[in-house]
Image (tube, rainbow, N blue to C red):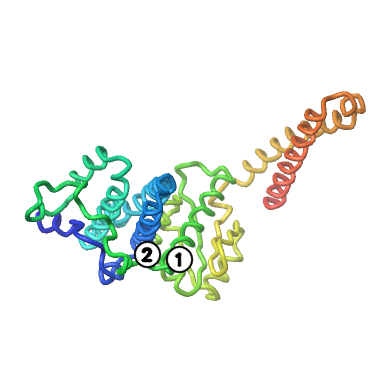
Amino acid sequence: DKESLAALHVDGPMSKEEFDSLSLPERYIISKCHNLVTSVTNDIEKYQLGAAGSKIYEFLWDQYADWYVEISKTRLYEGNGGGAYEEVQATRRVLVYVLDLSLRMLHPYMPYVTEHLWHHLPRSESPSGQAAHALMLADWPQMDDDIPLVTCDASVSTFECFQALTRSIRNARAEYNVEQGKKISATIIASGSLYDEITAELKSLVLLTKLDPDQVAVYEVGSKEAKAATTVESIQLVVQDGVEAYLPLAGLIDPEKERKRLEKQASKIGKEIEKLSTRLTSKGFVDKAPPALVDKARAELAELEDQASKINSSLEALS
């Protein structure tokens, strides 16, 4: 309705009151966006146009699209745990706000495309006395240098921990060759405010790392549940001081099937190591072959030995 759309209009910088009412991912993306505005403004004023453009590009892809747009799905859709009116409106507001500011910053680089996209965003009526309501006539995101845009370093730091936790679980899935669509179990152990924030964003973690929502839990460091989690045969992921994750091996892999796979891989690499070692111990090869070729063979041998060591460690973990 009109009232809902009006609430999405970007008529100036976000207030501290509104900012403080938002959840962690929203405070994070707004903080990153506002820091970007300050950095890009400084770069443009110093005519460092290439650096400014690169920063906007990286923010839109690496932060806005990769992280916040994905997390917004847990707010917008009932199937992902969202759907509540206030939560949906707050998420839409942040999505529009960040995109609006990004288009304003990008406008000097891509005037026609950004102008076209901006006219598809919810916006207020043309200001009185202005011939047209156009992006090229809109205010820069930060018009007054004496009034800094609201940010929160603590929110940025906390969400970066959440990102590190997400990457650690994703990396473990890849390392153990877990099927892409398979949902796994996990126990997260955290302390203090990290415990509170991770608990609040558990549905986001479930979506981003493909966890089983019925088999995931967050416990506080030192609790009985946290101590019990360490006794289960699991992969331990140390994210940072105060945050760990335990992924039960039983939910990740079929131990017998994985052992056979690793043994087959170890046998194949063992033969390659033997072949390369024989070549490198041959005086005919070492003395007559070009030095670059010898160095390449030694590097390949070192890499294979490293792979063999990792495979043996995985086999020991399964035994």
Residue 158: numbered disc: 1
Residue 171: numbered disc: none
Which is more toward the observer, 137 or 115? 137
Which is more toward the observer, 92 or 292? 292
Q: Residue at x 29, y 60 (%)?
A: 142
Task: Name the image quarter holding residue 159.
Answer: bottom left
- Seen as rendered, the residue at the extreme right is 283
- Seen as rendered, the residue at the extreme left is 128
Amino acid bearing label 2: Leu
Residue 189 position within the rendered picture, expressed as x and y whole percent measured from the top left: 52, 67
Q: Are the residues at dot 2 and dot 1 in contact (C-beta closer than 8 Å)?
A: yes
Residue 301 position within the rendered picture, expressed as x and y whole percent measured from the top left: 77, 36
Residue wearing tag 2: 24
Q: Quadrant of the N terminus?
A: bottom left
Task: Name the image quarter holding residue 231.
Answer: bottom right
Q: Check disc 2 and report its element: helix, strand or loop.
A: helix
Residue 260 position within the rendered picture, expressed as x and y whole percent measured from the top left: 67, 39
Amino acid bearing label 1: Thr
| In-image side of 122 versus 302 (left or right) | left
Residue 305 visible, this angle: yes
| In-image side of 287 versus 52 (left or right) | right
Q: For mark 1, does the 10 Å Cα neighbourhood hold few (<14), some (14 to 19), or many (20 or more) residues?
A: some
Q: Residue at x 22, y 61 (%)?
A: 12
Residue 144 position within the rendered picture, expressed as x and y whole percent measured from the top left: 28, 64
Q: CA distance from mark 2 to mark 1?
A: 8 Å
| In-image side of 31 versus 175 (left or right) | left
Q: Vertical placement of 302 versus 4: above or below?
A: above
Q: Check disc 1 and report its element: helix, strand or loop.
A: helix
Q: For mark 2, does the 10 Å Cα neighbourhood hold few (<14), some (14 to 19), or many (20 or more) residues?
A: many
